[in-house]
Image (cartoon, rainbow, N blue to C red):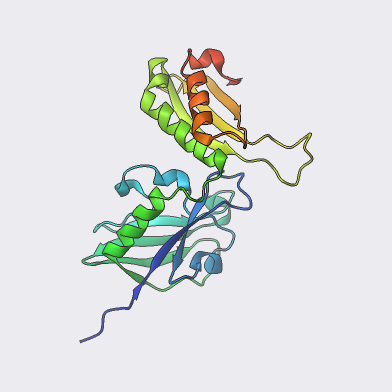
Amino acid sequence: MSERPAISVLTLRHRIPDDWAADPWAEVRPLIDGVDVLQEVHPEGLAPSRRHWAGPPATWPLAAAEEPRRVMITEPVCTAGCCGALYVTLRRAGDRVVWDSWENTSGGTAVPPAVHFDAARYDAELARAAADHSWEGPVDTIARLLERTLTESGWFERWDCVLLDVSPRRAEPDLPEEVADTEGVDVWFREGAGGGPGLYGYRLTTAPDRPADRQARWFAERILADDPRRTADVREG
């Protein structure tokens, strides 16, 4: 009788990418037994974005069910079709979660072997990472709180608009102050639930010396005070 494969330990670590233009949120990098295997196999790729960990557990990028699911576990800052990506298949097998059938479409041939995790410990680590906000800077906290308030308010639906995105906007550290973008939060929405042509946005500037929760409330009050199409900072189309 053959022995069952050894059990590995999954650790999820939040990291702000060096090149965050593709996605300003932190990436959630999976470490297997303390090793960042994605860095070894697909170093140019970004792990699943923190923005995808806000919904119910079944929607989390690394959620595993009995039905196997192929997941893009890293992608480049351009697109997977351009420079390739790293994929893995997740499946739940009894008391284990298995990662196997790795595929590197960036041209690299080396991929990790199949990995087995204890299912209960795996689920607990996913839940811990989803609830972890210790990595956040003030701009991340403001963006998260503001998005939650706007989503729960139903305000945009009232005005026949659709909220598209709420994201932190990070300052460029290497640019002169006169040309560098100001740190803040960007809010984008579209006119018309059917995908109308009008695209609108708020470019909100944050203050690092003021409480993040208070700033999120201020921004929400501004946006929820009137028809958002009337008060938006940016109008396209």
Residue 76 at x, y = what percent?
A: 56, 53
Q: From what the image shows, is residue 96 above or below residue 228?
A: below
Q: In the image, 137: left or right of 34?
A: right
**Viewer-proximal residue among 40 and 147:** 147
Residue 48 at x, y = what percent?
A: 46, 52
Residue 69 at x, y = what percent?
A: 33, 56
Q: In the image, 9: left or right of 164?
A: left
**Viewer-proximal residue among 197 and 138:** 138
Count of labels in the image: 0
Q: Is residue 62 visible?
A: no
Q: In the image, 89: left or right of 198?
A: left
**Viewer-proximal residue among 161 and 55:** 55
Q: From what the image shows, is residue 96 above or below residue 83?
A: below
Residue at image coords 70%, 43%:
172
Which image quadrant: the C terminus? top right
Q: Is residue 168 visible?
A: yes
Residue 204 at x, y = what percent?
A: 59, 28
Residue at image coords 26%, 84%:
3
Which image quadrant: the N terminus? bottom left
Residue at image coords 58%, 63%:
43
Residue at image coords 51%, 52%:
27
